[in-house]
Image (spheres, rainbow, N blue to C red):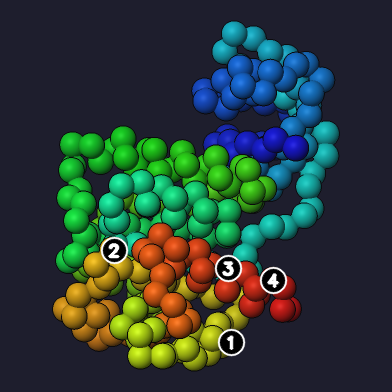
Amino acid sequence: MQRYFIQQPSDGHSPFVIDGDDYHHIVRVMRMKIGDVFLVVFPDQQTAKVKIDQITDQIVEVSIIAWEDQKSELPLHVTIASGLPKGDKLEWIIQKGTELGASEFVPFNADRSIVKWEKKKAAKKVERWNKIAKEAAEQSHRQVLPAVHSPMTLNELLALSKDYQFKIIAYEEDAKQGERSTFARLLNEAQEDDRLLLIFGPEGGLSDREIEQLTASGFERCGLGPRILRTETAPLYALSAISYQFELMR
């Protein structure tokens, strides 16, 4: 069943309206009609089944007919911080990472990032990234709409990290040396509702300077198995491992 994240709260009883891009998708793409049913997720993460009561040239009016109890969120908060990669790789990370349960995405300007962040195009880029996250969250039946931040500096990322219980660096040099236990140990130590921040370098990896700053700020380095993963693959591997640990093994 189609799902939409909406911004307005609901009192749970009165009909309400949907407009903007969601209106366009409901009417023009899905071609829904009066009486059709779909799901909406409110800002408080409550999900309701709604029925279309009225369609005009600009709005769809709906009323709630039932509340959904099923939960589909990872039991802990996972933030993916990616050194800005080339091309559309970050869009892939955001889309697939959302499907796998990530709560936040934080791009950052890494020493070896080839991409140069252009402030003139910043607003449109971030708007597109958040739209990708919204569409992926709707498709994968999330109750939480992941936040996608504007690219940060490493210092800004370190300041953000103070709010996390677990801070992890996926480091390919450790993987090359055969390190395979740290990530598993950290996942075993983590509890439901903990906050995990995972850092991934761009195509060229993280520099020695960045590794030193991160470890000095409490980050732990780890390998992600015996194979060296691409910058767009490593976050998805990590999220899959977290899902297995916290959703399939418990």
Asked if residue 224 is positioned above or below residue 97 in the image, the reply reads below
Give the quadrant of residue 57.
Answer: top right
* Sequence order check, earlier mark of 4 and 2: 2
Q: Give the label on residue 202, or none.
A: 2
Q: Nearer the viewer, mark 3 or mark 4?
A: 3
Distance from disc 3 to disc 4, alpha carbons, whole Å, reads 10 Å
Q: Which residue is mark 3?
A: 240
Quarter of the image that includes the C terminus: bottom right
Sequence-wise, the earlier of marks 1 and 3 is 1
Q: Which residue is mark 1?
A: 188
Q: Give the residue type that dot 3 points to.
A: Ser
Q: Secondary structure at mark 3?
A: helix
Whichever of labels 1 and 4 marks the residue nearer the N terminus, that label is 1
Q: Residue at x 52, y 53 (%)?
A: 96
Instruction: Check the image and name the residue furthest to the front.
Output: 227
Q: Nearer the viewer, mark 1 or mark 2?
A: 2
Left or right of 219 on screen, residue 45: right
